Image: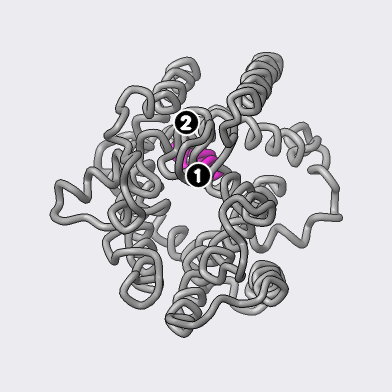
Amino acid sequence: MRLRYIDRIRAIAILCMVQVHTAAIIPPEGISVDHPIAFVSAAIGGMAAPMFVTISGWGIYRSATRRSNSGNNNISSWISWMIPRITILTICQLLVNSALFIDRGGRFDWMTPGVLTLLALASLIGPVIVYLTKKQRFSMMLLFMISPLIIGDLSGIDLYWSERVSSIGIEEWIERLLLNGTYPAFPWLAFIFLGSLIDGDKENLDNQNRIVKIGLIIIAISIIYSLYERTPWALTEGNAILTFFPSNTMFILTSGIFVVILFRILEGDETSGGEPFGGEEFSWLEPAGRLSLTIYVAHFVLLGIVAYEMQNQPRLEIYTAFILTILHTSIWIPLSILHEKYIPKFSFEELLRKFN
């Protein structure tokens, strides 16, 4: 049985990703990176991807656990579980890259590893994760979280965007996938392990609460330190306490804590037999959550057309850009409802289900 709060979290994650990607493609005139509007947009984007990857980790772990519990534990069975996921996610990533190709006004090279190749990699290690104990998965999460401190400059601190999304040869592509691309395995697999921990943590809510409290204290200290040193607390890239490109340890910690809090809020009483937070009031989000992968690919196709048409064009006025961003973000809600009513079998999600 599907958990409704999970679909709602998926919906929030994908809609936030649509918002931040739209804002990046049609940035308004006169808005610099230190403008409050830019900060709010970046904050939404900073939470969107961690939510998306964490909920994907939850799904991968849950699916792999079902496969393991069913007794299908031989190598050929696990290969038949992995290959469709890896293939479809990789194809979807190539579609995204092609839609928003950098030579047509977009942001990516056609072979750029992205969030979907990260999920493909997570599917590859899914059969291993399912056999790890909770303590081992927690240790792996911490290891990936602190990995930016370990690998140092290998995370691509000095890379320009054009370098981060391009790769010459298979060796550099693997480097982007694992270390210094847009969503490299180190440290982004931390969210996959976080998702696996959320799945089985109902009997250990006290431990979870304790970890959240410690995390919030560390975040508060980082904010105070930022104010004292007059250093930006968060930037998309550059010199700040939290950075997204590359994602540093404080970013992984901060976003991970807020993802856990969001999970706990939206869960409500559903896992104990009751209703998710808000009851039926937020049920309109659920179709978008059940269509998140399809929306992810489709919104990039639309943005690719916009990026191509806007090449060498002046930036839009702030109000125009704001309205278009809100419209493009919100339109996926009614489209998802209509999709579920009339063509529910036509989606990448359904394709994944057929192969499994």
Q: Earlier in the sequence, mark 1 or mark 2?
A: 1
Q: Nearer the viewer, residue 3 or 141?
A: 141
In the rendered image of this protein, does residue 248 appear above or below residue 60? above
Query: Who's the residue at 48% across and 81% down the image?
Result: 310
Q: Position of residue 308 (x, y in %)?
A: 43, 81
Viewed as shown, does residue 121 lie left or right of 296? left
Task: Evaluate whether residue 332 shows in this view.
Answer: no
Q: Nearer the viewer, residue 88 or 65?
A: 88
Query: Who's the residue at 38% across and 57% down the image?
Result: 89
Q: Secondary structure at mark 2?
A: helix
Viewed as shown, does residue 144 lie left or right of 197? left
Q: Position of residue 274 (x, y in %)?
A: 82, 38
* Residue of label 1: 53
Q: State the mark number for residue 193.
A: 2
| Structural crowding at the residue carrying mark 2, measured as other residues with C-alpha within 10 Å and reported as few (<14), some (14–19) or many (≥20) | many
Q: Give me the C-alpha separation between circle 1 and circle 2.
A: 10 Å
Q: Nearer the viewer, residue 244 or 85?
A: 244
> How many labels, in total?
2
Q: Secondary structure at mark 1?
A: helix
Q: Position of residue 211 (x, y in %)?
A: 63, 18
Identified by mark 2, the residue type is Phe
Reply yes or no: does residue 220 show up in magenta. no
Identified by mark 1, the residue type is Val
Q: Position of residue 347 (x, y in %)?
A: 50, 69
Tell me where the magenta segment starts and ends, as one range. Answer: 54-66
Q: State the mark number for residue 73.
A: none
| Structural crowding at the residue carrying mark 1, measured as other residues with C-alpha within 10 Å and reported as few (<14), some (14–19) or many (≥20) | many
